[in-house]
Amino acid sequence: MEHRISLITLGVSNLARAKAFYEHLGWRGQEVEGTVFFQAGGLALVLWSRDKLASDAGVPNPDTGGFGGISLAQNVRSRAEVDKVIATAAEAGAEVTQPARETFYGGYAGYFSDPDGHVWEIAWNPGFTLGADGTLTLPDFDAAN
């Protein structure tokens, strides 16, 4: 199993404000379907609605204090690998908060929380390229338009 962090997703209360903040710091964001992606070396920083992220991860509403507003993601090379990583995490004591399923973007993903409650997404995304060393490179979302 390859070990890496592919994306860090921050749940935000105001997407436009958060995007403007990071762009003010010099980051170049690409907004796609209500989500902002920033290339950050070999990984990506993602901004997404806090409510949508909590729902997608299968964790309590953020207003109840059950969700910290962040998920870590590991992109893998196949649907089978998603299932294997989630099963291995469960065997190690993780709580599966969202079983692996087909996603709205044509991929396959599930979530678990580690023993300290940190939420991880394990995903196969056919639109994101993984290099031989596991580094993720975001597509040029503007080129698709």
Image: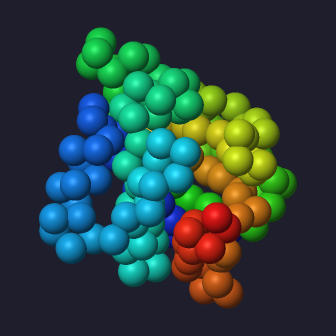
Residue drawn where x is 39% and y is 35% of the image: 49
Q: Is residue 82 left or right of residue 89?
A: right
The image quarter containing residue 26 is bottom left
User: Horizontal and vertical percent for residue 141?
Assistant: 58, 66
Which of 143 and 77 lies nearest the eye of the viewer? 143
Q: Is residue 14 left or right of residue 48?
A: left
Tell which residue pokes out farthest to the front in this image. 145
**Vertical side of 62 occupied by 10: above or below:** below
**Vertical side of 57 occupied by 9: above or below:** below
Which of 6 and 83 lies nearest the eye of the viewer? 6
Q: Is residue 121 left or right of residue 20?
A: right
Residue drawn where x is 41% and y is 25% of the image: 51
User: Horizontal and vertical percent for residue 92?
Assistant: 57, 43
Residue drawn where x is 64% and y is 84% of the image: 131
Tell which residue pokes out farthest to the right in this image. 80
Residue drawn where x is 46% and y is 34% of the image: 53
Tell which residue pokes out farthest to the bottom in this image. 132
Which of 82 and 89 lies nearest the eye of the viewer? 82
The quadrant of the rendering that contains the N terminus is bottom right
Q: Inspect this view and state whether residue 85 appears.
A: no
Q: Inspect this view and state whether residue 58 appears.
A: yes
Tell which residue pokes out farthest to the top in this image. 64
The image quarter containing residue 22 is bottom left
User: Horizontal and vertical percent for residue 18?
Assistant: 24, 48
User: Horizontal and vertical percent for residue 127?
Assistant: 71, 64
